[in-house]
Image (cartoon, helix red, strand yellow):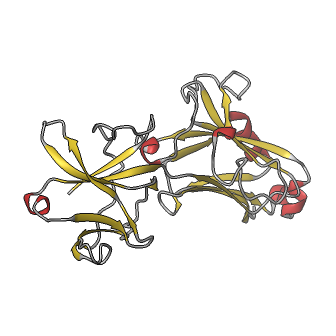
Amino acid sequence: MKISYEILTEVQFEHEYFKGIFSVFKIRPTTASSKILLNFGMEFREQYGRFYIYFDIFHAGVKRSREELLLKRMNLIFTIELVDSQFFNYTARFETKLSQELFYFSNPKRDNEFLHKKSLVSNDDLYKYTSRFFREPGLVKPFGILALKLSTDLRKVYVIRFEAMATYWRYVLVSDYLKAIPNAIVIDKEKQQVFIGPKSITLPSGAIYNCFVSPEPIKLSCKALNRYQLLESSAERPLNGRVIIRALQNPNHTYLSLLPPEEDAEPNRNYSEIII
């Protein structure tokens, strides 16, 4: 029997933090959808950060096109399991109780590459978890549900894209060498923007050090941005002083800040600490 597969559609998972495709989910077709895939000569294949639906163009010995298969207007349902415990350390916060809700992604809009309602996954894609969300026997609440409508306007590629968390970056000078530098400043050389400081901060050990805080939130990234520098400034040329550290490191997303917020800062302000 001749078997030849072609791609029916592809779903990619992307994240701003990784600047593209990332892999933190396990995708599974529901029991009912697995039967549909089998009965109609389709196959689910998962790869790094994406999955594909293939179809046999010689199903039951008869050649068929992608368009002919899509005329049957079937629906496939998938569960999404989160397998990265650090995911919410680098992903934009959702104003919700995630323990009671789940994400729901689907393709109702024609010619829209995104399976969510806005350009990035948002609170608008969260729904209260009840039995109507395709609960299967023995299945705990999944991270999300993905519903694909296989119709004639099915796109070849869909995207689910998450937003990176934005925090106030706080550089803390703890080494004896850096503490001794007069008129130290931290700058964003791309924006020619000076970080606020030096300010005093008390570490859990009780030691007091100087820190510099970004004037606005900065999105976290796994890529080295190479935008932030430590300078010894001068009154005449504050943004062109002697370079002490040419490229300050990014925050480590696995580290959760336990240091106190700034005085008079707005509540619930998120910080990322970089100890240098």
Give the side of residue 181 with respect to residue 112, left or right.
left
Q: What residue appears at the point 54 percent right and 44 percent down from the top-left corner?
A: 26
Disc count in the image?
A: 0
Estimate the x, y position of residue 101 in percent, counting from the top left: 61, 28
Picture layout, residue 137 above or below residue 18: above
Residue 83 coordinates in the image, percent (x, y):
46, 41
* Quadrant of res 30: top right
Q: Kindly identify the residue that appears in the image at 80 percent across and 63 percent down.
A: 57
Q: Nearer the viewer, residue 114 or 7?
A: 114
Residue 13 found in image quarter: bottom right
Left/right placement of residue 203 relative to residue 118 reads left
- Would you say 258 lies left or right of 205 here? right
Q: Nearer the viewer, residue 148 or 176?
A: 176
Q: Position of residue 173 (x, y in %)?
A: 19, 55
Q: Nearer the viewer, residue 182 or 133?
A: 182
In this rendering, the answer to whether 134 lies above or below 195 is above
Quadrant containing the N terminus in the rendered view: bottom right
Going 56% across and 25% down the picture, which residue do you hit? 140
Rendering coords of residue 255 (x, y %): 31, 45
- Look at the picture and state if 177 lies above or below 24: below
Q: Residue furthest front?
A: 236
**263 sits to left or right of 9:** left
The residue that appears at 68% across and 34% down in the rendered structure is 31
Looking at the figure, which quarter contains the C terminus? bottom left
Which quadrant holds residue 98?
top right
